[in-house]
Amino acid sequence: MVAAGLLAVAVLSWDRLVNLAAHIPLVPLVIVIGAVGCAVAADQVYKRTRTERQRRFAPRIRWWWVVLASAAVLAAVWATTALLLPQTADTQPGSETSKQRVEVVRTALAAGAGVGAAITVLLAFRRQHHHEEATERTEYDASERRINELYIKAVEQLGSAQAPVRLGGLYTLERLGQAAADHRQTIVDVICAYLRMPYMPPPPWWPVSRFRRAARELIGRKADNQRHQELQVRNTAELILLAHLCDYRPPDQRETTPADAQFWDGMGINLNHATLTYFDFNRLHITWASFAHATFTSQAWFQCATVTDGARFDGATFTSYASFDGATFNYDARFDSARFTSIASFDDATFNHGASRTDARALLTTPDGIPVNHAWPTGWEVQPTADGWGTLNEI
């Protein structure tokens, strides 16, 4: 349209353009402008819906590019000649007229050469742009290849029978996630999948007789060592999640203060049926969390945690102290059939969309008759039962 407008200005007089514009009806003009706008919008939508790899490939030069370039050069020569040649009619006849016509032809050819040079510069810019895209694509493919190799090697290390090799795989995944932000959710999913694997913690140490100690060393020493080693691997996996999923900024400064480089924003964790050994996730900040039927074998800390989308604790078992003080659940939080066998604290916890706690139970007294103190959030009530437990009901 710009090219057509320029040609119209060069060929037609201003009076004709004004008269032409005055005779154009308003409604068809609006329809034409709307059609052009819709065409441009459709083109942008089409470009954005294409895959990344399709956009990276340079399109070939079509035959109509050559036709348009030739037409632009010819139009420049013709327009220049049409504008300048009539001016030679007012000069005196003779050699001056011939010289001026020759100059007009030279000027027209120069204008055509200028248009051709501009098209050449445009093609050179296009070629350079595509060369840079090809270089960037090559570097991107090489980087993705290295990331895939490190990822595959780390996953293979997690399947090793040796605990030090599994530790190396976890640290490789952590380093990979720190370097490649696009793969962080996948790495978190892999670590969570490892924690969901069946596991039985080693038995606690108790003073036993010399005979029992010798029998344990003969029979179960190797198995206990493997379980202790696996415990160290699992503790390391939980510490890696702790290092990257907790946001230590004050809640009122998270919009203005940049996050720490170690924090991975926008993550979600799936620890269904996992056996968690020491879950210290104070100031946890994630989009969603699922701990359905998980077992917390030690203390579970969720102080000042924030879950923006949803949290599931249905069927979870808390065998030790559980703290949700100051935690914020912006969406639904489910505690259906959860079991609290020790102290549970929900001081200043916020449930913006409520909490589901059907058939949730809490231990009220120990077998020795010692009461277990719980701090339930507003709207929760404990109905004691005959077996020392209590059922969480809504007030």
Image: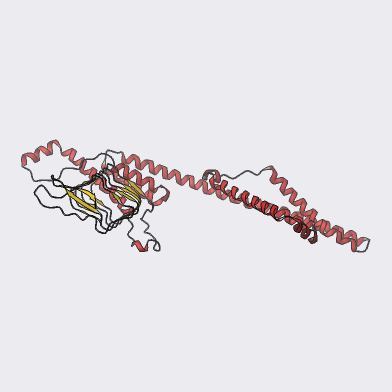
Front position in the image: 272 or 333: 333
Snapshot quadrant of residue 323: bottom left
Front position in the image: 300 or 133: 300
Question: Horizontally, is 213 left or right of 110 in the view?
Answer: left
> Is residue 33 something one can see in this rendering?
yes
Front position in the image: 181 or 19: 19
**Residue 30 percent location from the top left of the image:** 67, 54
Count of numbered circles in the view: 0
**Residue 126 percent location from the top left of the image:** 62, 50
Snapshot quadrant of residue 158: top left
Question: Horizontally, is 343 left or right of 98 in the view?
Answer: left
**Residue 112 percent location from the top left of the image:** 76, 54
Front position in the image: 297 or 146: 297
> Is residue 118 something one can see in this rendering?
no
Depicted 160 relative to depicted 7: above or below: above
Depicted 249 relative to depicted 73: above or below: below
Question: Horizontally, is 258 left or right of 26 in the view?
Answer: left
Question: Horizontally, is 374 left or right of 265 in the view?
Answer: left
Residue drawn at point x = 10 percent, y = 52 percent: 370
Residue drawn at point x = 45 percent, y = 45 percent: 144
**Residue 135 percent location from the top left of the image:** 54, 48
